[in-house]
Image (tube, grey):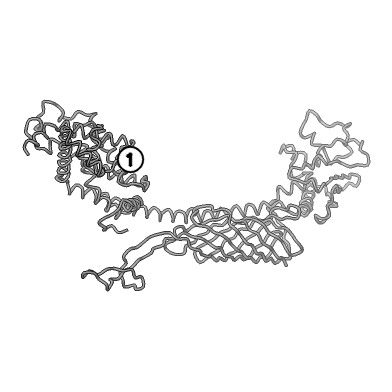
């Protein structure tokens, strides 16, 4: 298998993933090179915090290695994102069970008191979405996955995956309405 | 949300040309939807921008990748080491004990050979018992057995007489035992067949002072009286041995057993009879595997042939030389190298690579690993030991243990053979063969220790 090839198909990715599941270190390096930043970005959007995202990212790839024999050879990308999603959800649950000092109102939150940029506002509004809509939106509009892949990762029907993405878009549009109005007026 | 379906199809890049025209017409007539359309496009643009501007902790990501890579390399090395240890374990702690176990159990089967010349034992040991009695009593008994000299002289319901004469000529004891050749078995109670014969069955017991009934030794509450008659089929023992019988509390004490045949079988199972004249045997066996057993199910042995030369050194016992081969299917790693050389027909100054495996100087472009099944024959030579352990009418059942060497390792085989005498000197053979051997053909051999269970059939010539 030529790991230096630029345009690689999903079938080839799956073949390489099979080599990885048999313990091929070169195959792992190749897959890691392709997917490490995507997975980190996904963890970062899901968990909002750099530190937690790093932990979840690391745990995702350790799980991928430890459970490599369970890969069925069908769709490595879905399998990877599913693992990342489960890891992130575990972190979110853990966070809910503990009281973070950031959530205490007396603490100083610069985002609430200072003028912030468009990027930060979009990220903030994105975090206000329910988790089911948020993860669907991230997978579709940020990670550019197809609806059938999203359905596989979220383990839901294809139609439900579409509904969740559409609802997330509409909800985000409503949340960002003041900001978008400002942008339109400015332009 | 239905109003926005066309918008979402546009954002997802799934819209058709007709749908695109319809969408533009709707937006023209619905300013609110047009505003939403602009908002979605703006969000989409900002999301792309956020993605592009995301800062990645490169050092952290590289560190994680490196750690996992190192772990994979380490785990692979550990896995190889474990496989080597398992292989060594299998060779040292499975193969060798298995060989020892096979030899041991075959030995056990061989020595517990019920096919013993019963008459030979009975003659010899009966004499010794008689002498033992006389020495204890200081009265010489003269053994006057009329036991036949060999087994073939025993016929159904034949009468075997043991006669003990004491020095006193008037005291004559005669034991008569009815031997039913067909009913002799391990559990046959010959004692029940014993009767003391006298000219007058109504004579009282004290006419036979040298024998007492075991009833006297077992049950003191029921002693024999002067009026007891000999017709009672008690077990009788020589009177001079009575004290021993009582002290041992064993009416079946072998010293005065009235059942010499069974007694001798149980006490002399390790004895064999040497046959002076040896037979030379040539045996050819063919085999077809019916089962793969043991540690190497990946390999298959499809057929085998064995030729043996043996000499019968004892009755039913042969020792000889065995040689043969197995046709063996084995899974091995197949590595295919595809080499390439620069093509002369370069395009725009670039040289192209084309496949060329003819020259070893060309660099390997790609190496493909696979598995292929190869056919291999293993030849072996070894010694074997064979022993008959059961006769069923004209069929002899025997076991054969062999130990030999191949060019790849050692081989051990245990055969169970049923032999039928077709004519004088020609024996048909049918049986099973369990083999365990070590075989490898090259460094890519996947499994080394192998075992198989075969059906074998053949013919044996004896001279």
Q: Where does the image place residue A62, in percent across and percent down from the top left?
A: 28, 45
- Which chain letter goes with mark 1? A
Q: Position of residue B224 (x, y in %)?
A: 84, 32
Please tell me which residue is depicted at 47% across the width and 62% down the height of the picture: B440
Single out the residue that lies furthest toward the right: B200
Q: Residue at x 14, y 27 (%)?
A: A104
Query: Is disc 1 surrounded by few (<14), some (14 to 19) or many (20+) residues within 10 Å?
Result: some
- B253, above or below B393, in the image: above
Tell me the quadrant of the picture where the N terminus of chain A can be found.
Answer: bottom left
The residue located at (19%, 28%) in the rendering is A99
Q: How many marks?
A: 1
Residue B75 is at least partly visible in this image? no
Which quadrant of the structure image shows residue B187? top right
Is B440 placed left or right of B173 in the picture?
left
Residue A173 in picture, x, y percent from top left:
17, 33
Determine the residue positioned at 59% across, 66% down.
B323
Closer to the camera, B65 or B27?
B27
- Whether residue B328 is visible, yes or no, is yes
**In this view of the protein, which residue sits in the foreground, B25 or B232?**
B25
* x, y percent for residue B62: 21, 50
Q: Which residue corresponds to mark 1?
A: A152
- Residue closer to the observer: B76 or B34: B34
Residue at disc 1, secondary structure: helix
Q: Quadrant of the C terminus of chain A?
A: top left
């Amino acid at each position: 298998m030529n790991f230096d090839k630029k345009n690689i198909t999903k079938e080839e990715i799956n073949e390489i993933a099979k080599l990885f599941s048999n313990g091929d270190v070169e195959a792992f390096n190749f897959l890691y090179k392709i997917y490490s930043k995507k997975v980190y970005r996904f963890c970062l959007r899901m968990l909002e915090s750099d530190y937690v995202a790093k932990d979840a990212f690391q745990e995702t790839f350790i799980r991928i290695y430890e459970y490599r024999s369970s890969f069925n050879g069908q769709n490595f990308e879905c399998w990877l994102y599913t693992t990342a999603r489960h890891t992130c959800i575990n972190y979110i649950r853990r966070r809910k069970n503990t009281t973070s000092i950031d959530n205490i109102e007396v603490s100083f939150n610069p985002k609430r008191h200072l003028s912030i940029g468009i990027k930060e506002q979009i990220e903030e509004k994105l975090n206000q979405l329910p988790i089911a809509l948020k993860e669907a939106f991230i997978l579709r509009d940020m990670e550019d996955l197809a609806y059938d892949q999203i359905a596989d990762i979220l383990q839901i029907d294809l139609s439900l995956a579409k509904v969740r993405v559409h609802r997330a878009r509409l909800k985000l549009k409503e949340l960002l309405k003041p900001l978008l109005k400002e942008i339109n007026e400015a332009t | 949300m239905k109003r926005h379906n066309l918008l979402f199809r546009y954002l997802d890049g799934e819209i058709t040309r007709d749908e695109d025209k319809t969408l533009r017409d709707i937006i023209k007539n619905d300013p609110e939807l047009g505003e939403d359309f602009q908002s979605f496009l703006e969000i989409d643009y900002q999301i792309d921008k956020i993605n592009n501007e995301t800062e990645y902790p490169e050092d952290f990501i590289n560190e994680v990748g490196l750690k996992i890579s190192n772990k994979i390399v380490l785990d692979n090395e550990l896995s190889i080491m474990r496989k080597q240890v398992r292989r060594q374990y299998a060779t040292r702690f499975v193969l060798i004990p298995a060989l020892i176990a096979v030899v041991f159990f075959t030995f056990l089967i061989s020595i517990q050979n019920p096919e013993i010349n019963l008459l030979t034992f009975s003659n010899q040991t009966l004499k010794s018992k008689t002498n033992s009695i006389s020495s204890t009593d200081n009265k010489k008994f003269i053994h006057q057995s009329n036991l036949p000299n060999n087994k073939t002289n025993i016929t159904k319901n034949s009468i075997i007489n043991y006669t003990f004469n004491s020095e006193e000529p008037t005291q004559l004891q005669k034991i008569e035992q009815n031997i039913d050749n067909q009913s002799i078995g391990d559990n046959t109670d010959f004692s029940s067949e014993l009767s003391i014969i006298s000219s007058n069955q109504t004579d009282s017991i004290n006419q036979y002072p040298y024998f007492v009934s075991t009833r006297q030794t077992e049950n003191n509450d029921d002693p024999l009286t002067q009026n007891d008659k000999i017709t009672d089929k008690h077990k009788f023992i020589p009177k001079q041995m009575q004290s021993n019988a009582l002290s041992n509390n064993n009416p079946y004490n072998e010293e005065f057993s009235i059942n010499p045949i069974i007694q001798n079988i149980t006490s002399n199972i390790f004895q064999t009879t040497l046959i002076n004249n040896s037979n030379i045997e040539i045996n050819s066996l063919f085999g077809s595997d019916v089962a793969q057993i043991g540690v190497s199910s990946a390999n298959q042995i499809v057929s085998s042939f064995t030729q043996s030369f043996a000499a019968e050194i004892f009755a039913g016992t042969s020792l000889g030389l065995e040689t043969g081969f197995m046709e063996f299917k084995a899974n091995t790693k197949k590595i295919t190298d595809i080499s390439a050389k620069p093509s002369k027909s370069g395009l725009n100054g670039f040289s192209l690579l084309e496949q060329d495996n003819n020259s070893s100087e060309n660099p390997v472009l790609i190496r493909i690993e696979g598995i292929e099944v190869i056919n291999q024959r293993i030849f072996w030579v070894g010694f074997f030991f064979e022993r008959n352990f059961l006769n069923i009418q004209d069929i002899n059942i025997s076991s054969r243990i062999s130990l030999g060497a191949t060019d790849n390792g050692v081989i051990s085989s245990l055969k169970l053979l049923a032999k039928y005498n077709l004519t004088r000197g020609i024996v048909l053979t049918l049986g099973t063969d369990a083999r365990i051997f070590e075989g490898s053909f090259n460094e890519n051999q996947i499994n080394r220790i192998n075992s198989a269970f075969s059906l074998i059939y053949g013919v044996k010539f004896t001279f």
